[in-house]
């Protein structure tokens, strides 16, 4: 089951009249993790007992899937063709030769999404790389916008219908700053955390003027709650997030309880990060990796590194002890290996129960 997804309520056999029905909620959260030494060498020899994971501050019991690197892979290539992305089309056309390394020797399907002010699926998922090559070679420059958050929300939906046995990954090539998305920050953070999709980002820099203009659209709150208390209206609330969405994401109870309070701090950190560098932030939120590129040579180097990392992740999972709806902050660490570096997703979103409604 995909991370963050909740199975429908399951009922026992029809009970006799007068006996209440017991509903069971089953949630499985998947946490892909990459472990490296200080020098960058990959570490393959750890077990589930070597890891410690907390969900909203509460330690969880982990399981480790054997040979996760042999699972089939669904990869969605998401490329910016609008804005400054129109000048990167020649670099994109070299991608087919680089994708073989990312896919490895496992069964795979690849799709292509191009975006400017709007995302478009230009190649449906296919195992035939010649079709992917044609799609990338036929890309055209789009409008002046680069709606990265819209494209990612669209891409996650496209990937969500892939078979559950497939690992899911997005390769995002875009500039650092979002231009023109209608997807709100809350929706974007929810989309990228409500899935077991790992996002790998390679980005080229936005201009300084673009970065300055876009940063003005984001608030910079310093505290996890409004000054008047959790039930007060926040005078510094982000105008891009409707008040009802904030209420759903940050319930008063969640703000007041210290372990859960970290979840809101994680979201605020994500909001701040999205204002500075969208592809870097979403990569870190999902446990992926972020690189900058200036030309074909640097892009090739970045993708070669990613190719080595994709099949070598530990596939950890757990059933939350307290599956409360809303955003959850994750923290993964190693018990006895302080010198090793762990990369993993930092959050997930749990949908509320439907109370038996269809």
Image (cartoon, rainbow, N blue to C red):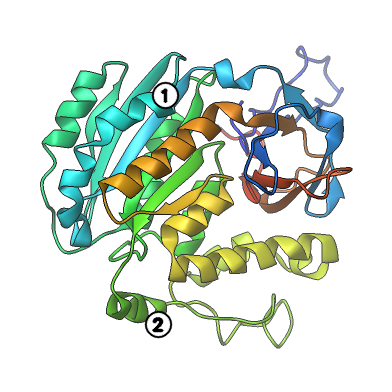
Quickly name the residue at label 2: 216
Query: Which of the 4 image quadrants contains residue 125?
Result: top left
Nearer the viewer's eye, disc 1 or disc 2?
1
Q: Nearer the viewer, residue 320 or 96?
A: 96
Secondary structure found at label 2 = loop
Please tell me which of labels 1 and 2 falls first in the chain: 1
Residue name at image x 27 percent, y 52 percent:
295
Bin the neighbour count of mark 1 within 10 Å (Cα to Cα): few under 14, some 14-19, many 20 and up: some
Q: Position of residue 92 (x, y in %)?
A: 22, 42
Q: Nearer the viewer, residue 63 or 18?
A: 63
Question: Disc 1 and disc 2: Cα gap in Å?
Answer: 39 Å
> Is residue 181 toward the left or the right of residue 11 in the image?
left
Bin the neighbour count of mark 2 within 10 Å (Cα to Cα): few under 14, some 14-19, many 20 and up: few
Residue name at image x 11 percent, y 36 percent:
138
Q: Quadrant of the N terminus?
A: top right
- Say whether residue 154 is visible: no
> Is residue 20 toward the left or the right of residue 14 in the image?
right
Q: Position of residue 53 (x, y in %)?
A: 80, 44
Query: Which of the 4 image quadrants contains residue 83?
Result: bottom left
Q: Where is residue 100 in the image (x, y as percent from the top left)?
A: 35, 24
Q: In which quarter of the image is the C terminus?
A: top right
Secondary structure found at label 1 = helix
Label pair 1/2, CB-CB below 8 angstroms: no
Q: Nearer the viewer, residue 256 or 44?
A: 44
Q: Position of residue 250 (x, y in %)?
A: 66, 65
Residue name at image x 76 percent, y 12 percent:
13
Q: Is residue 1 above or below residue 95?
A: above
Quickly name the residue at label 1: 103
- Say whether residue 181 is visible: yes
Residue name at image x 88 percent, y 43 percent:
335
Q: Is residue 5 above or below residue 254?
A: above
């Amino acid at each position: 089951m995909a991370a963050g997804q909740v199975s429908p309520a399951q009922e026992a056999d029809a009970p006799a009249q007068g006996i209440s029905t017991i509903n069971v909620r089953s949630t499985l959260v998947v946490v892909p993790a990459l472990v490296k030494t200080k020098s960058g060498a990959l570490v393959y020899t750890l077990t589930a007992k070597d890891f410690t994971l907390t969900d909203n501050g509460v330690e969880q019991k982990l399981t480790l899937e054997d040979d996760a690197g042999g699972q089939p892979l669904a990869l969605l290539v998401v490329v910016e063709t609008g804005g400054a992305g129109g000048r990167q089309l020649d670099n994109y056309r070299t991608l087919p030769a680089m994708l073989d390394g990312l896919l490895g020797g496992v069964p795979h399907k690849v799709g292509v999404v191009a975006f400017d002010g709007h995302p478009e699926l230009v190649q449906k998922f296919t195992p035939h790389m010649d079709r992917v090559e044609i799609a990338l070679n036929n890309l055209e420059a789009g409008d002046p916008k680069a709606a990265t958050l819209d494209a990612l929300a669209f891409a996650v939906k496209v990937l969500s219908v892939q078979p559950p046995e497939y690992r899911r990954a997005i390769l995002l090539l875009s500039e650092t700053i979002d231009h023109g998305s209608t997807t709100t920050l809350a929706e974007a953070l929810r989309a990228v955390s409500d899935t077991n999709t790992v996002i790998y980002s390679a980005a080229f820099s936005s201009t300084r003027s673009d970065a300055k203009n876009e940063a003005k659209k984001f608030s910079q709150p310093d505290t996890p709650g409004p000054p008047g208390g959790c039930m007060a209206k926040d005078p510094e609330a982000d105008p891009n997030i409707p008040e009802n969405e904030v209420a759903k994401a940050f319930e008063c109870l969640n703000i007041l309880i210290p372990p859960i309070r970290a979840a809101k701090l994680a979201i605020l950190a994500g909001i701040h990060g999205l204002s500075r560098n969208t592809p870097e932030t979403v990569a870190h939120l999902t446990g992926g990796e972020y690189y900058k590129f200036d030309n074909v040579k640097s892009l090739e180097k970045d993708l070669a590194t990613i190719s080595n990392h994709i099949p070598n992740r530990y596939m950890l999972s757990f059933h939350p002890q307290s599956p409360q709806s809303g955003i959850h902050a994750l923290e993964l660490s190693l018990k006895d290996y302080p010198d090793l570096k762990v990369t993993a997703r930092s959050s997930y979103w749990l949908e509320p129960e439907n109370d038996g409604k269809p």
